[in-house]
Image (cartoon, rainbow, N blue to C red):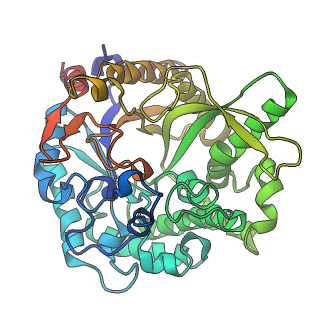
Amino acid sequence: MLPHRSDFPSDFLFGAATSAYQIEGHAQGGAGRTHWDDFAATPGNVAGAENGSIACDHLNRMDEDLDLLKDAGFDVYRFSTSWARVLPEGRGTPNAQGLDFYDRLVDGLLERGIKPAATLYHWELPSPLSDLGGWRNRDIASWFADYTEILMSRIGDRVWSAAPINEPWCVAWLSHFEGAHAPGLRDIRATARAMHHVLLAHGRATQVMRGLGMKNLGAVCNMEFAAPANETDGARRAAQVQDAIYNRFFISGLTKGCYPDEVLDGLGAHLPDGWQDDFDTITQPIDWIGLNYYTRKLYDAAPAGAPWPATVEVEGPLPKTAMNWEIYPEGLSHFLTMFQRDYTGDLPIYVTENGMAGLSELTGDPLSDPDRIAYLAAHLEQVQNAVSQGVPVKGYFTWSLLDNYEWAAGYAPRFGLIHVDWTSLNRYPKASFSAIREALNS
């Protein structure tokens, strides 16, 4: 059973989250091509060569989806906007249809009494900007600032909150070092530049939004608990390096204006000239910090002579989701506590994403997902523990409202509270949706 709303502080907010490319249907409404379209069109990159052309068809079913949010009793909806829907070429002339869509989305939320929480970028870079080097090119910070001004001049007066970029680790490391996401590079120099430029773009966008008079601006970092696979010094060192890359690099840059030594050991020589001078921009004041959390990973040392970071991921023993991610709720309270203690102090913290790709619904009734209910209950318990210890956690967002396009994994994994039939695109609430509705409305 999920904890009830009354089990949390009276000002605690509950929400659901989605992202533009994963649900909207990018081949519609005048949107431009993105590097995810290019990545998916390259054989071997995405399961089934699937893409986000139609996705959940949210572009045409928005009112139905917003009604579902209201029915569940959510206070806030965390959505993202597509850069290529607003600016098909990444720069230049805006797409009126795209701006109109986000206008209607924000108004539709407000009409239903739901707070709009906007994220400006959730990974769908316009292809013409990718052609110019994308996140490797320092100019992307200015391009992103221009996009921010165009979009937020339209909707910024009505959104409850805004954050520039979702999960910078995925934007930079996963996509430029591991090659698992668009643009699919495996290049340490590209990685170093992307990791720095994504933070520079965050700072420039924040400056623009402040200039427009916007308030309640934040940043969203994803965290993944890194643990040693054994008791050796090598494994402990590997976990420490992975923790620095994944968890400490971005939040340290945002809040302290520096990068961890363990990361500079490998990336320092590849960072752009004058990178140290950018921290005045990167560390623009924010009003809240968002934490996305799903799992933990175990690490051991790579064989002798392996290049930096010289870490090897090891299969863990805990129960796993359909993404083969270990279920480790304790990691959530670890990061909530770490945020307050080491980086953000009294700054409000929101769990901006937490959820699972269910296993039970894939093998039986697609609307029965007891494993998801158990997952959410266990993680909400960790949130309660953190709150009881004085950590300023102010809200929790479930990922995701809808089954959606799960990037390189295609449409097979299902993270949604709402089942989407991929043939008809009809929506069907799962048991977890009903459990949340009861918890929030009782």
Residue 271, how many percent across, how many down? 74, 67
Instruction: Confirm whether residue 220 shows in the render.
Output: yes
Taking 107 as reference, is 26 left or right? right
Residue 286, how many percent across, how many down? 51, 53
Residue 365, how many percent across, how many down? 21, 24
Instruction: Confirm whether residue 80 shows in the render.
Output: no
Q: Is 410 located above or below residue 212 in the figure?
A: above
Q: How many marks?
A: 0
Which of these two is toward me, 39 or 199?
A: 39
Residue sitting at 46 percent across and 73 percent down? 145
Which of these two is toward me, 3 or 308?
A: 308
Which of these two is toward me, 284 or 71?
A: 71
Residue 33, how many percent across, how many down? 35, 74
Which quadrant holds residue 301? top right
Residue sitting at 18 percent across and 60 percent down? 59
Residue sitting at 40 percent across and 66 percent down? 41
For the N terminus, the quadrant is top left
For the C terminus, the quadrant is top left
Q: Is 297 located above or below residue 131 in the figure?
A: above
Residue that extends furthest to the top in the rendered view of this protein: 1
Residue that extends furthest to the bottom in the rendered view of this protein: 92
Taking 22 as reference, is 275 left or right? right
Which of these two is toward me, 408 or 63?
A: 408
Which quadrant holds residue 43? bottom left
Residue sitting at 73 percent across and 55 percent down? 258
